[in-house]
Amino acid sequence: MSHAYDPKGASKPFFMGEAGIGGDAAQSTDNQIQRYDFSYGVWMADYAIQSINAGQAGLIAWDMDDAMHTYGSYGAAGLKGWGFWNSLAGCKGYPGDDFKLRPWFYTWSLLCRLFPSGSQTLMVKNIDGSACRVAGVRLPDGKGFSFTVVNESTTPRNITLQVPGVGQAALYEYRYFAGEQAVDKDGFPVTSTTHQNADLESGLNVQLPGEGVVFLTTRNPTN
């Protein structure tokens, strides 16, 4: 229906400007109480993967900082609690540790870094009958690739990531699982391992021991 009221609608890029996952509690209080939970990082990654595969041109997460908006119900200042952190932490009665990065920053920051503007979406074969999904892009340089795989269930899954015509490449892997989130001293994601000569032609095995997300990219983390 994108062209029902606009003859050129089907050719225009579609951006989601306030991407977030709600529910009854979030709608009634304007707070995502699960923003502190590991699972919200999985859900938001899955949201992005499905959006990429559906053809959306981009997403902007709702939102960055709890303190950006009031008229909510979080604390004395009436904040809308949806952010990666709360910059009013330690003030107005908000706990001091509320400024810490929340778990979903891990997956969303990697999506922003590894799936940049100008990337070309790759067609991905569906994984039948599971809560396991994959998205992939060719990076703007026309040579590199990024992939993300999500497992929303607690059932372990192994998939084979195969890209015909690519051959071998160095792939940097980031892993987001409960108890397995490699970070630097500031809490920013770092690689868990590097596959120096990954043969994408034959296929690379990706292990997902349960609920979580894996990122694989040719983009060197030092760049």
Image (cartoon, rainbow, N blue to C red):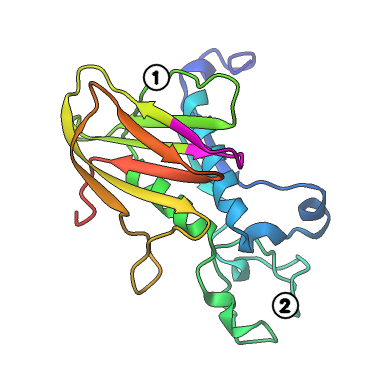
Q: In the rendering, which numbered label is found on residue 77?
A: 2
Query: Is residue 128 shown to the viewer in this render?
Result: yes
Residue at 54%, 65% (x, y): give it.
Answer: 102
Residue type at tag 1? Met
Whether 203 is drawn above or below 4: the answer is below
Q: Position of residue 67 (x, y in %)?
A: 61, 71
Relative to residue 216, is residue 18 drawn left or right? right
Q: Position of residue 87 (x, y in %)?
A: 55, 76
Whether 135 is drawn above or below 170: the answer is above
* Labels 1 & 2 near each other (Cβ < 8 A): no
Residue at 60%, 21% (x, y): give it.
Answer: 129
Magenta residues, as a range? 150-158
**Which residue corresponds to mark 1?**
123
Residue at 72%, 48% (x, y): give it.
Answer: 22
- Which of pointers 1 and 2 lies earlier in the amino acid sequence? 2
Instruction: Determine the image quadrant of residue 119.
Output: top left
